[in-house]
Image: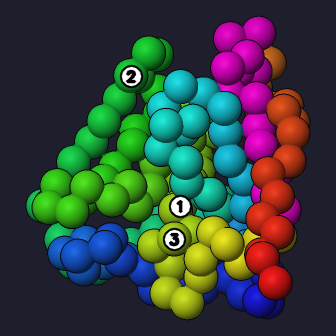
Amino acid sequence: MDKNIREFDGACHCGTVRFHVRLKDGLHSARRCTCSYCRMRGAVAVSAGLSDLEITQGVDALTLYQFNTGVAKHYFCSRCGIYTHHQRRSNPNEYGVNVACLDGISPFDFPEVPVNDGVSHPSDRGENTGSDLAGMLKFIPSE
């Protein structure tokens, strides 16, 4: 997998929602989070600027979910339920994009994924420099 690739087409599971995205740092920004929502969602996300994600089909099928402070905006397909992207709380000028929705990419392509501490969010501590590292998630394929 080439982590330097910056442009992808993507879609939800059923294909109702389709998008094109230009990633800020390719796949190098892959991460997970420990906040209550991300912990249950389990997705690996990568970063894109707000103007770098274009919904090309199915914008009317996107559903918005917000909780707690209401700053983060989590979008998912109302038909198949797949999370496609979210506007980040730690940086509202960025989207986190679900790597599983990117054409040709799987979360299992990453041998290691940093996990940010979303339980103790930097915005709650008066810092806004991004979440602190809580640990690493590893995928070790069976032989």
C-alpha distance separating marks 2 and 3:
23 Å
Q: Please provide percent x and percent y for residue 142.
A: 78, 76
Q: Quadrant of residue 115?
A: top right
SS at badge 1:
strand
Residue located beneath label 3 in the image: 100
Amino acid, disc 2: Phe
Which stretch is magenta?
112-126
Residue at the (35%, 77%) spot, across then down: 11
Q: Is residue 104 left or right of residue 116?
A: left
> How many numbered marks, from 0 up?
3
Tell me which numbered mark, 2 or 3, is placed earlier along the sequence.
2
C-alpha distance separating marks 3 and 1:
9 Å
**Residue 18 marker:** none
Compared with residue 56, is residue 117 higher up or lower down, i.e. above or below? above
Residue at the (68%, 47%) spot, across then down: 32
* CB contact under 8 Å: marks 3 and 1: no
Q: Is residue 125 magenta?
A: yes
Residue located beneath label 1 in the image: 97
SS at badge 3:
helix
Residue at the (52%, 62%) spot, across then down: 98
Foreground disc of the pair 3, 1:
3
Residue located beneath label 2 in the image: 67
Q: Is residue 1 left or right of residue 42?
A: right
Q: Residue furthest front?
A: 143
Q: Does residue 22 appear anywhere in the picture?
A: no
Q: Please provide percent x and percent y for residue 93.
A: 58, 46
Q: Residues within 10 Å of mark 1 (few under 14, many from 20)?
A: many
Tell me which numbered mark, 2 or 1, is placed earlier along the sequence.
2
Amino acid, disc 3: Ala
Compared with residue 54, is residue 9 higher up or lower down, i.e. above or below? below
Q: Split into 4 quadrants, where in the image is the N terminus?
A: bottom right
Q: Quadrant of residue 101?
A: bottom left
